[in-house]
Amino acid sequence: MTDPGPPPRPAGHRLLAGRTAVVTAAAGTGIGGATALRLLEEGARVLLSDAHARRLRDVAGRLGEEFGADRVAALPCDVTDESRVGALFDAAERRHGRLDVVVNNAGLGGEAELTDMTDAQWATVLDVTLTGTFRCTRAALRRMRAAGVGGVVVNNASVVGWRAQRGQAHYAAAKAGVMALTRCASVEAAAYGVRVNAVAPSLADHPHLSKVTRPELLRELTSREAFGRAAEPWEVANVIVFLASDYSSYMTGEVLSVSSRHP
């Protein structure tokens, strides 16, 4: 049977109308960029961030033309730099007066056998993927607690945090850490009405993926998916939108797998 491919991308329903969102690593063609677009389609005002300043400026310009410059802003941010993380969240509050949704998407992968992995490789992946998520979650929760009006944090984890995969010890450890961070943060944040959840995608198809992943590995991973294809980035973004919206109002500390992978 021929795979029919992904369904049409759904239209927005203004699930996040009037809310302010921050999305990290949002300047590419992957999950971050798709999430920024879906949040805008659902009515949110979005502050996009990325370490790549030129690409970020281009993406923000295109989205501003489509949705209005008053709803789209951009600020470069390296999540390994605490001062720049603070400046990012301060900018969101200055521009819109509040902070409702934070999507921590920044992450860094790689492929190396554990016996060949250097300390620098390990530390770099952990600093961006886990500690960067910690820095942004901490900055968001401090401001949400002070504002006293609730809020939502959605972290991007990975099914690799649950599943063993050769050459991914650093990335898997970081993503498992994001899951644990999400659960612990949710318990603390519940006291001031903030929800913290995560998504765990398996395989999302975008141009950058093919640049950093061997073709044979991509074919192997794709063959394990029940639908016989990778997810479209917007299919992961839809789940992020769900977690950011009031449709998940009684969910916190959860890690939702966005995967069709079969055993």
Image (spheres, rainbow, N blue to C red):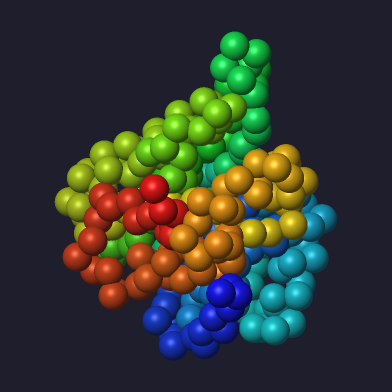
Residue 192, placed above or below residue 130: below
Q: Nearer the viewer, residue 157 or 8?
A: 8
Q: Tell me the residue at 46%/71% (across/down).
A: 238
Residue 233 image position (x, y, % from top left): 58, 64
Q: In this image, 112 relative to 239: left or right?
A: right
Drawn side of residue 146 relative to residue 14, left or right? left
Q: Is residue 80 visible?
A: no
Residue at image point 62% right, 38% down = 108
Looking at this view, is 161 or 87 the one in front?
161
Name the spot of residue 197 as percent of width and height, x first. 33, 54
The residue lying at 20 percent from left, 45 percent from top is: 187
Residue located 52% across and 26% down the image:
169
Q: How many marks?
A: 0
The residue lying toward the viewer, choosing from 14 and 90, is 14
Q: For residue 215, say whether it is visible.
A: yes
Quadrant into which the N terminus falls = bottom right
Task: Tell me: residue 107, above or below residue 5.
Answer: above
List x then y, in percent, for residue 252: 25, 55
Above or below: residue 71 compared with residue 117: below
- Residue 117: which quarter of the image? top right
Q: Residue 235: x and y, percent?
A: 51, 69
Q: Dividing the picture into quarters, in which one does residue 33 lie?
A: bottom right
Q: Is residue 217 left or right of residue 144?
A: right
